[in-house]
Image: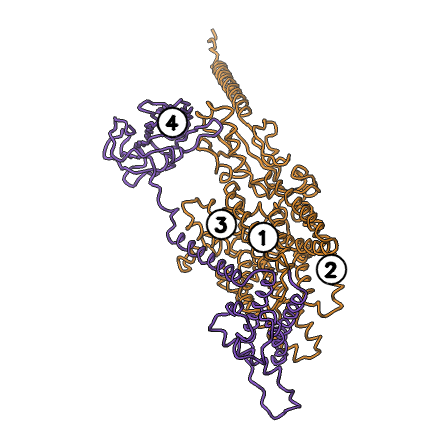
Chain colours: A purple, B orange
């Protein structure tokens, strides 16, 4: 709870600060007119901080501020802050020109310096206000440094993430793809790991060395089920395709066709199962999409990667690579 | 305490600020967890392409000039589009639309924070907290966040610019350099999305002129006026030049004539005549060329939360009265300038559009930039009201008012949850919600509902006819075009414009009324209002095929009969043409 006295002095400090700022900021006013306000603002701060006012301008800033407020001003700046206070006191206490017209006016800091000085003073008034509300300077400092640290840590983390971009590491995929240059799965295949069997090559070949027509492809993976599941399997292809589960053809789409769908619903027991897809492209457009549904409410979709295991690149065409 | 604006902190300021930060963080997290569900809108494809063209303009050192003539988009800066193109590269492997939606969401979240900032500048921490709560409860803003590539980023630039401009007014005649730089960047970014951001420059110039004029008049001294004018003119020139430079960076077309071209874009945009269409308005179908002054009042009246629009009208009256009341005393001048700028920024765009007879369509999206500012203004009014009531009635009033504010916001949040991910179709209770607005006003004008409809429709088919589903490639068409229709459909769906099994129609252009005789197999609704419908054309196709077959059969039979008839005629003609043997006379 702020005492009425403290409240009044804080109000006075804010008013003097605003007046000083208005006069310094106004291009039409000589900054010297702001000096009495500046002096009174500092006196309010000193009263709030130390409970007493220094003699004149004091020797150092420590004469104006208690150690806990002094800590808020960096040690290297304290000298210049005190120099401005000294100038302000000197001007405020200077006899008017008609009293001693002969003496030269004391030198004033530049307007920019005065403005930054006013900002420092503003921070002090705020700190004193917060102290009056129960927040010690240490807590204030900790809060300030906490926010700064959060910005730095956040910025550094963002920078590192953007530099490394871990989300762009290539997913190697759990399907082993073998692409043959003939429609009869003959010849030296191009082997690749694929994340999914979802291709729409149109009139191009699947790889640089495979022709766009009359080629074949075979994909193998291991499907891992944690419980017995009714699975809906579907192939949408142009042209021929078929899907094998544990060595048995479950979706036979081997008749020559343009883009068409074929599917089956099969009960698959818990465990690891070998899934193979074979495809032959005859002429014109080429595409194949393999989807599966493991829940009667969800439409068939590409099989999630976490349900698949990669069978390895070197597999025997007739053996079960998932055993 | 800031010496430029030495406001004594209130006893609960820290609490309000902390609460506002927590509220905004929660909102940001929610936004970043829910953006995936929003659909692609009409404008997005072109803005994605435009972003790529601007990027390739810079990558090729200006050799690729496609961005300079790309559709009508070259008249827009690429502030969002170019940044989006860069972000899409970073966000790979997200596909380009997912990435741009995420980017849009991030920009939208910045707008939430900007609204808080504006509220805080206007009325302090409590007003900031209220502004954050209210903007989070504004469906029309939230619903545009992920998928509006120009109106929403512009709104974000606008609200930040307004916050910084109003803050700067309080520091006249010596605007701190850091604040001036921030203001220049904010205005520049707003203009880099829509050149309409030039309004902000006008506000800046007008406030400077008023400030100088007022203080010069107070001093009644030409030299003083000159000094004020010089100082503020230098600041103003610096801010405008900085903003102009920021704008040009994103806008290759404007780079070729940095002064004339942006101004030419302003002229062109304020007389935008490229889209002529009929649309529902106040229950009638009208041409967007025949729209009158009622257009925006209707849309703002029905699309903003009820309490926001009521308080906005009340706030305008209170604001004008306050302006006139305070004008008697010079010491209120700065506060009046802030209030006046806020009111002008909210009313002038509408008045100007009415004056110019601008072509308007698509609900209030072209004026979306007013929404966050309006919300912040309302938050300020509520803050002032709360302050007065608490001062008069003490703590019980504070508790009651907190409950009222929480109830109003919770009501809106509940509506937003019901509407998700189509929050932008929101209509308030004054028109009877979305249900009351369908047919009378534009709801889903952006074709945003297609993706959601397609996904749910496919699920519906799978549930109802799984065996047919597995063995069928369905053909589908709709007014939303292949991009939006096909995006979430599984591979056994094919877009076919002429021959299709299903028709997907949203409400714009009465697309949902086509094929009315075919049964509706799926309807996407929100709050009882129809947004999209899928009609099953299979039976009609089968009937048509049967009819065609019968017709073909009849044609074949007719052709056969014709052929037989022709043959018989020919035979007869041949017979008749044969010369009759004549008997020799004896």
The residue labelled by disc 4 is A257
The residue labelled by disc 1 is B20
The outermost residue toward the bottom is A102
Query: Are labels 1 and 3 assigned to the same chain?
Result: yes
Decide which of tag 2 and tag 3 comes sooner along the chain. 3
Circle number at residue B320: 2
Decide which of tag 1 and tag 3 comes sooner along the chain. 1
Query: Mark 1 to mark 2: distance in Å?
Result: 29 Å
Residue A160: x percent and y percent? 39, 54
Query: Mark 4 to mark 1: distance in Å?
Result: 62 Å
Q: In what element is the residue under mark 1?
A: helix
Q: Single out the mark in the foreground, 4 or 2.
A: 2
Q: In what element is the residue under mark 4?
A: loop
Query: Mark 4 to mark 2: distance in Å?
Result: 74 Å
Residue A70: x percent and y percent? 52, 70
Residue A143: x percent and y percent? 51, 59
Q: In what element is the residue under mark 2?
A: helix
């Amino acid at each position: 709870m702020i005492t009425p006295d403290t409240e009044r002095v804080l109000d006075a400090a804010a008013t003097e600060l605003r007046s000083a700022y208005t006069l310094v900021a106004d291009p039409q006013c000589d900054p010297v007119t702001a000096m009495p306000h500046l002096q009174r603002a500092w006196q309010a701060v000193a009263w709030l901080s130390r409970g007493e006012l220094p003699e004149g301008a004091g020797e150092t800033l420590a004469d104006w501020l208690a150690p806990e407020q002094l800590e808020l001003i960096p040690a290297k700046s304290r000298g210049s802050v005190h120099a401005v206070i000294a100038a302000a006191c000197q001007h405020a206490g200077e006899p008017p020109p008609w009293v001693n017209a002969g003496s030269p006016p004391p030198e004033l800091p530049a307007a920019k310096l005065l403005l930054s000085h006013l900002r420092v003073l503003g921070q002090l008034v705020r700190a004193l206000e917060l102290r009056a509300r129960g927040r010690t300077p240490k807590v204030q400092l900790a809060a300030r440094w906490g926010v700064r640290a959060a910005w730095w840590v956040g910025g550094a983390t963002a920078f590192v993430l953007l530099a490394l971009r871990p989300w762009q590491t290539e997913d190697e995929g759990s399907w082993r793809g073998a692409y043959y240059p003939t429609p009869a799965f003959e010849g030296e295949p191009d082997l690749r790991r694929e994340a999914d069997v979802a291709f729409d090559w149109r009139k191009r070949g699947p790889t640089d060395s495979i022709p766009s027509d009359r080629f074949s492809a075979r994909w193998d993976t291991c499907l891992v089920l944690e419980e017995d599941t009714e699975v809906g399997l579907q192939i949408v292809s142009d042209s021929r395709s078929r899907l094998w589960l544990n060595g048995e053809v479950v979706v036979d789409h081997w008749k020559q066709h343009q883009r068409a769908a074929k599917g089956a619903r099969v009960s698959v027991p818990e465990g690891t199962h070998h899934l193979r897809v074979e495809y032959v492209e005859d002429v014109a457009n080429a595409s194949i999409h393999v989807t599966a549904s493991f829940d009667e409410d969800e439409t068939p979709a590409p099989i999630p990667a976490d349900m698949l295991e990669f069978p390895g690149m070197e597999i025997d065409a007739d053996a079960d690579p998932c055993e | 305490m800031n010496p430029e604006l030495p406001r004594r902190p209130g006893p609960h300021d820290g609490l309000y600020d902390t609460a506002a930060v927590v509220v905004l963080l929660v909102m940001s997290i929610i936004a970043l967890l829910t953006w995936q569900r929003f659909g692609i809108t009409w404008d997005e494809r072109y803005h994605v392409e435009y972003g790529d063209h601007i990027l390739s303009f810079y990558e090729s050192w200006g050799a690729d000039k496609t961005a300079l003539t790309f559709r009508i988009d070259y008249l827009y800066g690429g502030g969002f589009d170019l940044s989006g193109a860069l972000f899409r590269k970073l966000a790979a492997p997200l596909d380009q639309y997912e990435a741009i939606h995420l980017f849009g969401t991030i920009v939208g979240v910045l707008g939430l924070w900007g609204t808080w900032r504006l509220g805080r500048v206007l009325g302090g921490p409590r007003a900031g907290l209220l502004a954050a709560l209210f903007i989070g409860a504004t469906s029309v803003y939230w619903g545009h966040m992920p998928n509006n590539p120009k109106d929403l980023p512009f709104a974000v630039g606008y609200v930040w610019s307004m916050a910084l401009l109003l803050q700067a007014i309080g520091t006249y005649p010596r605007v701190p350099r850091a604040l001036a730089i921030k203001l220049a960047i904010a205005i520049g970014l707003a203009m880099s999305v829509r050149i309409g951001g030039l309004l902000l420059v006008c506000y800046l110039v007008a406030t400077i002129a008023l400030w100088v004029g007022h203080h010069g008049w107070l001093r009644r001294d030409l030299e003083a006026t000159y000094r004020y004018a010089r100082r503020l003119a230098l600041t103003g020139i610096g801010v405008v030049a900085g903003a102009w430079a920021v704008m040009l960076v994103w806008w290759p077309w404007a780079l070729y004539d940095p002064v004339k071209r942006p101004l030419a874009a302003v002229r062109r945009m304020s007389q935008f005549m490229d889209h002529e269409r009929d649309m529902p308005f106040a229950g009638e179908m009208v041409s967007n060329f025949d729209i009158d002054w009622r257009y925006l009042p209707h849309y703002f009246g029905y699309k903003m939360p009820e309490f926001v629009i009521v308080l906005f009208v009340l706030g305008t009256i209170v604001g004008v009265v306050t302006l006139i009341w305070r004008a008697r005393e010079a010491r209120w001048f700065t506060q009046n300038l802030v209030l006046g700028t806020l009111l002008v920024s909210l009313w002038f765009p509408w008045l100007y559009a009415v004056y110019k007879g601008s072509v308007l369509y698509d609900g209030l999206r072209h004026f979306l930039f007013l929404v966050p500012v309006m919300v912040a203004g309302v938050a300020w009014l509520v803050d002032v009201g709360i302050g007065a009531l608490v001062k008069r009635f003490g703590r019980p009033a504070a508790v009651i008012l907190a409950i009222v504010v929480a109830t109003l916001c919770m009501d809106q949040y509940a509506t937003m949850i019901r509407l998700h991910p189509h929050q932008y179709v929101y209509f308030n209770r004054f028109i009877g919600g979305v249900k009351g607005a369908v047919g009378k006003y534009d709801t889903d004008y952006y074709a945003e509902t297609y993706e959601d409809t397609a996904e749910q429709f496919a699920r519906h088919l799978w549930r109802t006819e799984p065996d047919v589903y597995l063995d069928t490639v369905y053909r589908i068409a709709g007014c939303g075009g292949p991009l939006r229709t096909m995006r979430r459909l599984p591979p056994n769906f094919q877009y076919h414009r002429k021959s299709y099994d299903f028709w997907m129609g949203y409400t714009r252009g009465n697309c949902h009324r086509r094929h009315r005789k075919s049964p509706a197999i799926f309807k996407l609704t929100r709050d009882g209002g129809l947004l999209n419908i899928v009609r099953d054309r299979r039976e009609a196709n089968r009937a048509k095929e049967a009819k065609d077959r019968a017709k073909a059969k009849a044609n074949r039979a007719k052709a056969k009969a014709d052929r037989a008839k022709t043959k018989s005629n020919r035979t007869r003609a041949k017979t008749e043409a044969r010369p009759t043997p004549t008997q020799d006379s004896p």
